[in-house]
Amino acid sequence: MNEPYDNKQDTSCQIVQGLLQKARRYGATAAKVVLDKASGYRVNVRLGKLETLEYQDDCSLVLTVYRGQHAGTVGGSDLSDDALTLMLDKACEIAQLTQADSCAGLAASEAMAFDYPSLDLCYPWPLTPVQAKDMAQTCESLARDYDKRIVNSEGVSISTLEGFKVYGNTHGFIGYYQKTRHSMSCSLIAKQGTSMQRDGDYTIGLQPNQLLAPDTLAKSAGKRVVDRLNARDLASQRCPVIFDASIAHQLFDCLLQAIRGEHLYKHASWLLNSLNKPVLPAWMTLIEQPHLIGALGSLPFDLEGVAISDKYIVKDGILCSYLLNSYTARQLGIDTIGYAGGIRTLTVNSNQRSVADLNALLLKMDRGLLITELLGNGVSIVTGDYSQGAFGYWVEHGRIQYPVHQITIAGNLRDMLKRIAYVSQDIDLRHSVRVGAVLIEEMAVAGQL
């Protein structure tokens, strides 16, 4: 993306606006356009050598035209006038052939974010590929030197991406934003006797200065992998379970999936008909903060141009909102709530039952299981049944005793979420769901018979 900011914005918005105007002339009753561009690179280093250098320079445009309630959608990457005209011809042709859908159409014009905020989401990283390679080599070298039991490396990867999106529709709305995303990851292999383990760590952010320093990431990755050595089996039992902050967001991702409109109108969710009913402990609140400065999930408007703002998803344990776009809202017979594209930044508030950090949470638990990795996908959005392979650590008297492997944790989300006992305040900021470690009162743990 070599054009100056203003030129990119002006050119892209002109393309979108011109296509919408032409769609009207072609007889469309409504139309929308999404234009995405992204560029950047990824450097991968392993055992001190550059393995790959991958450049990315992508462009995509998706056009949807409506003839009444008949819709036609086409996509492409060629933004020339001839290519755009051909796309419009094809979209109109498809719209003539498709079956009418009473729920099809744009979000309501009065819901558009005509005064959307500037969130300052773009922070280019002036890092050359050569500098990225050197940084990755330094990180890997420090990580491999962390402990003599680290015998191999799966490499260090550094990536930087800068993109922008334009969304426009025939309500007269055209929105535009730029966004960056930078990351660094380190993966290692450790061995002691017959025990061999793989683990690592990563860092990610909108801004380069939000990333961990290479030496800090190296130390964290090294510690994580050697801590896993000599893992033991665990007897099957029921016990308290802590989800480490690095994976606790997945619990709430399960809840969010269950309240998405497409699952609800198809009657395929364990949270069907749960609006205004308790789904979490009464001391817990989930609030979406889509305009939170510096957050990975922040956006100025939803992917239909709908205005968005801070909103309770769960308040005092009660489910306040489903996650609906205009189509799923019409299927359910209610107004859109601005969730085209999904949730943005979700903050978990639990002031009445929060502790300072993971160590304090371990003391609260006293005896039980700390989970640091989940394996496979054993979650049913339809029934809420939960069964996941896991790796973690056995805890006695509030202290980690030894690593445990080859275990499965199981329960039902309806019960699990309501039995959350405490949450730590050391929040993991690498995910759209902002939450610390989570203690669940009791779960079934399947291990050695």
Image (cartoon, helix red, strand yellow):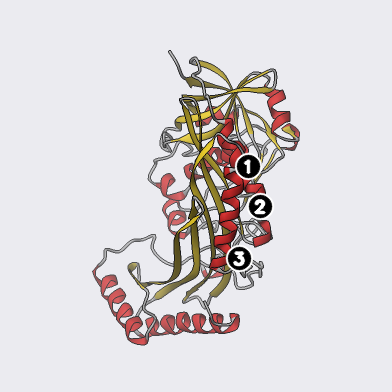
Mark 3 Cα-neighbour bin, 10 Å: few <14, some 14–19, many ≥20? many
Kind of residue at disc 1: Ser
Q: Quadrant of residue 147?
A: top right
Task: Read off the residue under disc 3.
Answer: 300
In the rendered image, which residue does mark 1 sit on?
Answer: 220
Residue at the location (64% across, 56% down)? 295
Residue 219 relative to residue 21: left or right? right
User: In the figure, 18 relative to 422: above or below?
Assistant: below
Residue 431 in view (yes/no): no
Is 216 on the left-hand or right-hand side of 97? right
Q: Which residue is mark 2?
A: 212
**Callout 1: 10 Å neighbours few (<14), some, many (20+)?**
some
**Element type at marker 1?**
helix
The residue at the point 66 percent across, 49 percent down is 215
Q: Do the CB atoms of the residues marked 2 and 1 lie less than 8 Å apart? A: yes
Which secondary structure lies at badge 2?
A: loop
